[in-house]
Image: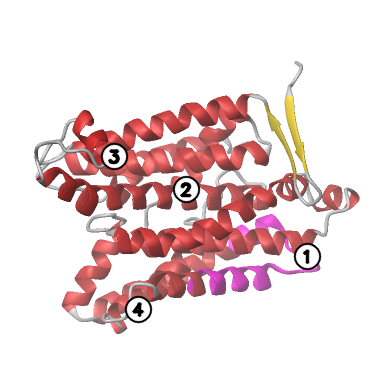
Amino acid sequence: MKLDWLVIRSQAISFRIDRRVPVILLCLAVVIVVAMVMNLGRGEYPISPLDIVKTSLGLDTGNPDHAFVIHNLRLPRTLVAFMVGVALAISGTIFQGLTHNPLADPGIIGINAGASLMAVTVIILFPSAPIYTLPLSAFAGALLMAVLIYLLAWNKGSSPIRLILMGIGLSAIASAITSLMITFGNIYDVSNALVWLAGSVYGRTSEQVFSLLPWLVIFVPMALILARHLNALNLGDDVAKSLGSRVEWQRGLLVLVGVALAAVGVATAGMIGFIGLIAPHLGRQLVGATHEGLIPTSALLGGIIVVVADLVGRTLFAPIELPCGVVTAVVGAPYFLYLLIRNRKK
């Protein structure tokens, strides 16, 4: 079968993507717009798609409440859901490539547990801390967890299987400490921490949007630039070295990017699980395994999944609202078991 590729080169950057990728990205962008419009319009105060478009363009709809509901309540929440999905999906794609394991996910290998531990520490011990300290503390916890995993798995090199096993063990320890803090914390702060741990974008404002944006602006382009190195690492260390890759240096940079994106996603919306597992698998079905095309495709798929999960959580049992982390877990857990069964002989 003949494959058509688009090759884009500059002095510092090289991309080689399947010709299907731009078309699929365009289709996914349309799906994202539709999902966002539905999320903005559905709820206890329904707004028609036409009024959503008019309000977004600053045109008069004859109802001044529309602007308040969309701009102050629903739009920041929807943007946060999309951005968190993008961050978690790219992180999952990176870690699956680094570990050569289709079941790898920031939540499974311990990165999210480290981020959660530090974020819960801030919520319970420093409840009056500024909002920007939460992503920073989560990043510190995730980075510390990644360093510990890397060091403990090191034995004349970093084996993917050792990384996964160390991650699972350290994740259990971090989760136990998190549970201990919740047990002995102040009841009001513990309640906030439990809602956050469930994984929700409820009550998110433009403040969270602007605190999340710089992280994506920095680390998403880094992930795209490093995509070709991830292709080489995915072939194995020996092959990557034969291709001229500086294996440990490039793996370290990719771990940093994956950790940062997972941390900021967890810090902003809590433990929304399985996005980093599902989105890369769906992306491979659409565009193949080459990371130059897989990373942006997975990113858009992750954004779609979280936006739709938030919509379902808000409307399925209205007026009761389910955290979107619960919705993704209901879908993601069976999908993980399916992948586990499918890959048991590999």
Q: In this view, does 21 lie above or below 310?
A: above
Is the C-beta separation of discs 4 and 1 under 8 Å?
A: no
- The residue depicted at 81 percent of the width and 68 percent of the height is 156
Report the Cα–Cα distance between label 3 and label 1. 54 Å
Q: Which amino acid does label 4 sit on?
A: Val
Label 3–label 1 contact, CB within 8 A: no
Q: What residue type is labelled 2?
A: Val
Dot 2 falls on a residue whose secondary structure is helix
Q: Which of the two discs, 2 and 3, sits closer to the camera?
A: 3
Residue 231 occupies quadrant? top right
- Can you say which quadrant of the picture contains the C terminus? top right
Determine the CA span between mark 2 and mark 3.
25 Å
Residue type at numbered disc 1:
Gly
Helix, strand or loop status at disc 1: loop
Is residue 2 highlighted in magenta? Answer: no
Q: Earlier in the sequence, mark 4 or mark 1?
A: 4
Q: Name the residue under label 1.
A: 157
Nearest to N terminus: mark 2 or mark 1: 2
Q: Provide the residue span drawn in magenta.
A: 141-165
